Image (cartoon, grey):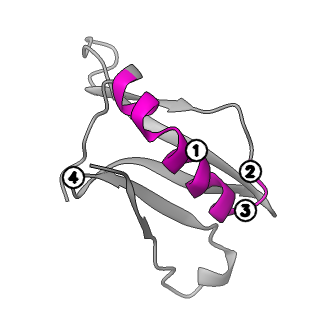
Amino acid sequence: MGFTFKKHKKEGRYRSFERDMTDIKLKRKACGLISEIDFDKYCISFAVKREPTGSDPAPFKWIYFKKIFKNETKARAAIKKFEKEIQEKYNLHFFED
């Protein structure tokens, strides 16, 4: 099963100032984000499972890919191209809706 994408809807009074964000989903559950860093710069991040500790009780941590993309379409294409490697290499954490 491959990755799917869902764009966040901008809402509210100051929606024009919000940056673009798109959920990366696998099996209908969110596991990552494509987010706009700056104008025409997008990055990919995934939530990866980890063991919670007393000082940091979260069951996941965010990992970011070094590659920066010029638009969201190229970021999506890169995820689709390497989806098998991503699923095999990382133990992805899935968020409940």
Disc 2 to disc 3, C-alpha distance: 6 Å
- Location of residue 44 with respect to 4 vertically, above or below: above
Q: Count neighbours of disc 2 (C-alpha within 10 A) and say few if under 14, some if 14 to 19, many if 20 or more.
A: some
- Element marked by disc 3: loop
Real-space Cα separation, disc 1 to disc 3, in angstroms: 11 Å
Query: Pointer 1: what residue?
Result: 44
| Mark number displayed over residue 71 | 3
Residue that appears at 68% across and 75% down = 17
Q: Quadrant of residue 57?
A: top left
Q: CA distance from mark 4 to mark 1?
A: 18 Å
SS for tag 4? loop
| Amino acid, disc 3 | Asn
Q: Kindly check if marks 2 and 1 are in contact, taking CB atoms under 8 A apart as contact.
A: yes
Residue range (magenta) = 69-88
Observer-side mark, 4 or 1, equals 4
Could you tell me residue 51's position as x and y percent? 25, 13
Indicate the position of residue 79 as horizontal and vertical percent values. 53, 46
The residue wearing badge 4 is 27
Asked if the residue at tag 1 contacts the one at tag 4, i.e. Cβ–Cβ closer than 8 Å, the answer is no
Q: Is residue 81 magenta?
A: yes
Q: Determine if the magenta segment contains residue 56.
A: no
Query: For the residues marked 4 and 2, what is the alpha-carbon distance in whole angstroms?
Result: 25 Å
- Name the chief secondary structure element in magenta: helix
Residue drawn 45% across and 38% down? 46
- Residue 69's disc is 2
